[in-house]
Image (tube, helix red, strand yellow):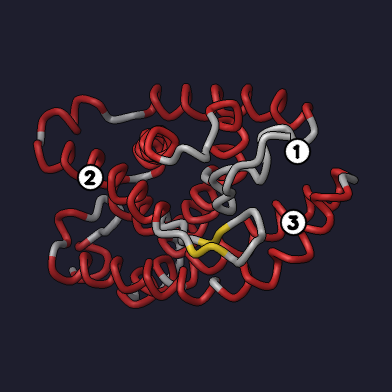
Amino acid sequence: MVPCTAEIYLVTFYTDLFPAFWHWLCWPLLIFCLSTAIWQFPLRKVLAVPLRQHLVLGSAVAMALIWMLAAQLGDHPFGIHLFAVTVVVMLIGVSPTLIASGLALVLYTLVNRDVQWIAFAVNYSLGILPPILVSAACLKIVSRLPQKNLFAYMLGVGFAGAIVARLITTFLLYGLMLLSGEAVLLKIADTYLPWMLLITFPEGFINGTIASGVTVYLPHWVRSFDEERYLG
């Protein structure tokens, strides 16, 4: 086995530790998601306004930087870091976030020598895609609420949505490791679960704080924010 430092949900513990079929399943999923995102990407609208270009590219760089701020847990071959994708979904939308997060993972893999390209599809499919989809679902649920409450948007999506995204992704990966039947993965799963639950509140706090601040002071940056609905 070739060891590599593992940042939970973004890189693997060991590139050859996961079952081979995980990679076979994740590559088609990665190609499908990115192809759909590119097809739905509002290219003309983004190119028409420089601010939108800055938000997409800036989000990619910001996510890569946040992912690099990982806390290593002693001698265990993994670390803890924030997702920070919920607020990006609120800022630029789902398809741009799928693309921006892919760019962020490319930057992250280029900079971090411990991350190997062979695990790119697994990292994206298990560490990036689930929180994005969960955040998008939370955003849609809040937008359909009969009450037009601004705090339901900022905190219901930014704070609670980020927490739900973290929890669902945590238990998804935990369940997959248990189902793998690999002894090393089973041991790692039991070790990592409490720490992933511990970082759930900070995930919600950071995303909720950024989402609230940007919505209040720079509402024109937030693509999902409907001023007519919440302030009209």
Which quadrant of the figure contains the N terminus? top right
Classed neighbour count for the residue bearing mark 2: other residues with Cα under 10 Å, few (<14), some (14–19), many (≥20): some
Label 1 or label 3, whichever lies nearer to me, is: 1
What amino acid is labelled 3 in the image? Tyr
In this rendered view, identify the residue nearer to me: 81 or 86.
81
Nearer-N-terminus badge (1/3): 1
- Give the number of the mark in front: 1 or 2: 1
Of callouts 3 and 2, which one flags the residue occurring earlier in the amino acid sequence?
A: 2
Which residue is nearer to you in this view: 174 or 11? Answer: 11
Position in image of residue 134 (x %, y %): 55, 54
In x, y percent, where is residue 67?
42, 53
Going from the N terminus, do you reach mark 1 or mark 2 first?
1
38 with respect to 193 (left or right) = left
Q: Position of residue 42 (x, y in %)?
A: 28, 30
The residue at which mark 3 appears reads as 174
Q: What residue sits right under mark 2 in the picture? A: 58
Percent across and percent down for residue 77 are 64, 54
Residue 116 picture quarter: top right
Proximity of marks 1 and 2: CB atoms separated by less than 8 Å: no
Residue 232 sits above or below residue 16 on the image: below
Which residue bears the numbered disc 1?
Answer: 17
Q: Amino acid at mark 2?
A: Gly
Q: Do callouts 3 and 2 mark residues in contact (Cβ within 8 Å)?
A: no
SS type, badge 2: helix
SS state under label 3:
helix
Query: Hey, what amino acid is under mark 1?
Result: Leu
